[in-house]
Image (cartoon, helix red, strand yellow):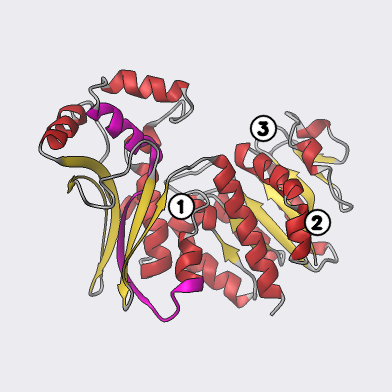
Amino acid sequence: MRIHIALIGFGHVARRFVRLLDESREALRALDLEPVVVGIATRRHGAVFDAAGLEAHTLATLSNLAAASGAVGPALDSPTAAEILQRLGRMRSDARVMIETTVLNVQSGEPAISHVRAALAAGAHVITANKGPVACAYRRLADDAEARRLSFLHEGAVMDGIPIFNLVRETMPAATIHGFRGVINSTTNHMLCALERGEDYAAALVRMQADGVAEADPSLDVDGWDAAAKVAAMANVWLDARITPAAVAREGLTPACGDRARAALRAGRRLKLIGAAFRDGARIDARVSLEELPADDPLAILDGQANALEIQSTPLGRVVITERDGGLEKTAYALLTDLVTIRRRLGR
């Protein structure tokens, strides 16, 4: 089955994804899946579209898409992205898919939400690694996709490529999810481990920026916003919470956390930034908070950039899934798994 793909956003994750498509050609062919990238739109480097298929591996190395043949516009926030999705929708194809990997806007979820809506309106399935659409507008977008008999998938939005959404959807049929808690932000877990060792807060943050662990602007991580967006996303999908990140009670890291982390360690405990949400009747308690955990807690044992999530359910009880190694390759793999899910659904 040939699936035509438009990429909206072409940063590190999307570039790794197109390389992964090339690396996985034989495995995908065995699944009767032939992906063809026909369009790419970026915020800074223009956009390209070719119905015959772009040389994805070559484009992955380009810094300026507008220099490629077939450029159709100057910027992502102009009509370029919409035009690419319209062209995708007009193609005769076994299936059409938009993959959205633009930068998170934790307050509004835009422009990613608009991209998802436009893709669905054009008759394209949607895969996103952007937390914004799931954290800010999940129910509306999921209902729209269902009404159009299209898929809206988002495995890469939380915990890179670890299959948390697939786990519940595919392997826990008829289970009721009551809540979850987890260490779900790599930067802050790395920071807390460094503070335990006696590192100065500012020095540890600078080192992590130099190592590529933390962003140049780490505020989304250390202020708890990234974790809040992930909590909102999971609560919306599993608990039908219909909340946004702004509704998640939020605590972040400060220089004072160093003394607290070391004191907890001396007492045989560990300080962790926990993202959690639980249903209490009609109320959803969603929060990101610093918690001192017993040493044998499955979340307490995490070091460095490791993440873990504990899902509480009936009748299965507590299920823990751990990510020992994160990174953009794993997020790119999540996009690939969602593409395979779409192929399997179309084969039913």
Q: Is residue 214 visible?
A: yes
Which sits in the foreground, 94 or 166? Answer: 166
- For disc 1, the marked residue is 158
Q: Is 322 above or below relative to 208?
A: below
- For disc 2, the marked residue is 87
Q: Is residue 298 magenta?
A: no
> In the rendering, at what x and y percent does residue 161 appear?
53, 52
- Which region shows up in magenta? 170-196
Dot 1: element: loop
Q: CA distance from mark 3 to mark 2?
A: 21 Å
> In the rendering, at what x and y percent does residue 346 appear?
70, 74
10 Å crowding of disc 1: few (<14), some (14-19), many (20+): many
* Residue at 43 percent of width and 30 percent of height: 214
Q: Is residue 194 magenta?
A: yes
Count up the numbered dots: 3
10 Å crowding of disc 2: few (<14), some (14-19), many (20+): some
- For disc 3, the marked residue is 44
Residue 303 in the figure: left or right of residue 170: left
Q: Quadrant of residue 315?
A: bottom left
Q: CA distance from mark 3 to mark 1?
A: 26 Å
> In the rendering, at what x and y percent does residue 143 appear?
53, 72
